[in-house]
Image: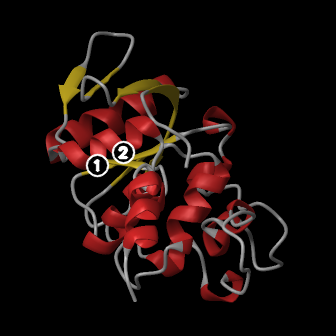
């Protein structure tokens, strides 16, 4: 898993509440067995017209001002619906390092931490500010600083955010649950060697 310490990137906004995992990555693309390659199908039904190939000119991520965006600002209850981990894989593969919203579905929120995408919860008023600023600027950048637990822009706007200490530590080190366990590989091996069957 890629570590997350501090990231500055272009903001894409998605002014929709209750975006569910089937909208993030539709079910027909879940047949792959790898964790990669899902980015091309992210928000597929919204990103493309009915032919499945032509970009929808009205969709948020297809706007030239947000090309290469790596921070997604969304509305409440982002990632609701099924528990598919593929939703986070698709966001990550597309290039998103962080999603900022007033609230997240619990399973999606947990899956983000397990896959190196930082979910940040901010107050509705802060989310409104980010939407307004992004709209006014066209291309808008934020810095997400996990070490200091703050989100800020170049104009002086800044907000702190909370992250569970153990999750923060694992993301800073780039460790998923398996990677965290493997830090104790020597002790596990010693135990297995000494264990009598």
Left or right: 4 with respect to 54?
left
Q: Relative to 69, is 172 on the left or the right?
A: left
Image quadrant of residue 86?
A: bottom right
Helix, strand or loop for disc 1: helix
Location of residue 91 with respect to 175 vertically, above or below: below
Residue at mark 1:
167
Pick the residue in front: 92 or 165.
165
At which x and y percent is residue 189?
Answer: 47, 62
Is disc 2 in contact with disc 1, using a CB cutoff of under 8 Å? Answer: yes
Residue depicted at 52% across the width and 70% down the height: 87
* Label 2 crowd bin: few (<14), some (14–19), many (20+), radius 10 Å: many
Q: Secondary structure at mark 2?
A: helix
Residue 144 visible, this angle: yes
Residue at the spot 20% in from the left edge and 27% down from the top edge? 159
Q: Quadrant of residue 132?
A: top left
- The residue sitting at 48% across, 42% down in the picture is 174
- Label 2: which residue? 170
């Amino acid at each position: 898993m890629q570590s997350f310490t501090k990231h500055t990137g272009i903001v894409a906004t998605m002014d929709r509440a209750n975006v569910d995992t089937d909208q993030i990555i539709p079910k027909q693309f879940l047949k792959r067995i790898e964790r990669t390659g899902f980015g091309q199908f992210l928000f597929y039904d919204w990103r493309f017209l009915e032919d499945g190939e032509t970009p929808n000119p009205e969709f948020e991520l297809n706007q030239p001002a947000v090309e290469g965006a790596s921070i997604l600002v969304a509305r409440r209850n982002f990632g609701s619906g099924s528990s598919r981990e593929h939703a986070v894989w698709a966001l990550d593969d597309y290039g998103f390092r962080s999603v900022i919203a007033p609230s997240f579905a619990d399973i999606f929120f947990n899956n983000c931490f397990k896959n190196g995408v930082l979910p940040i919860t901010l107050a509705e008023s802060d989310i409104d500010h980010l939407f307004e600023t992004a709209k006014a600027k066209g291309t808008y950048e934020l810095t997400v600083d996990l070490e200091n637990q703050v989100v800020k822009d170049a104009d002086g706007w800044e907000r702190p955010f909370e992250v569970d200490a153990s999750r923060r530590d694992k993301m800073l080190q780039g460790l998923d649950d398996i990677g965290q366990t493997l830090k104790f590989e020597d002790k596990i091996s010693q135990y297995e060697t000494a264990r009598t069957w």
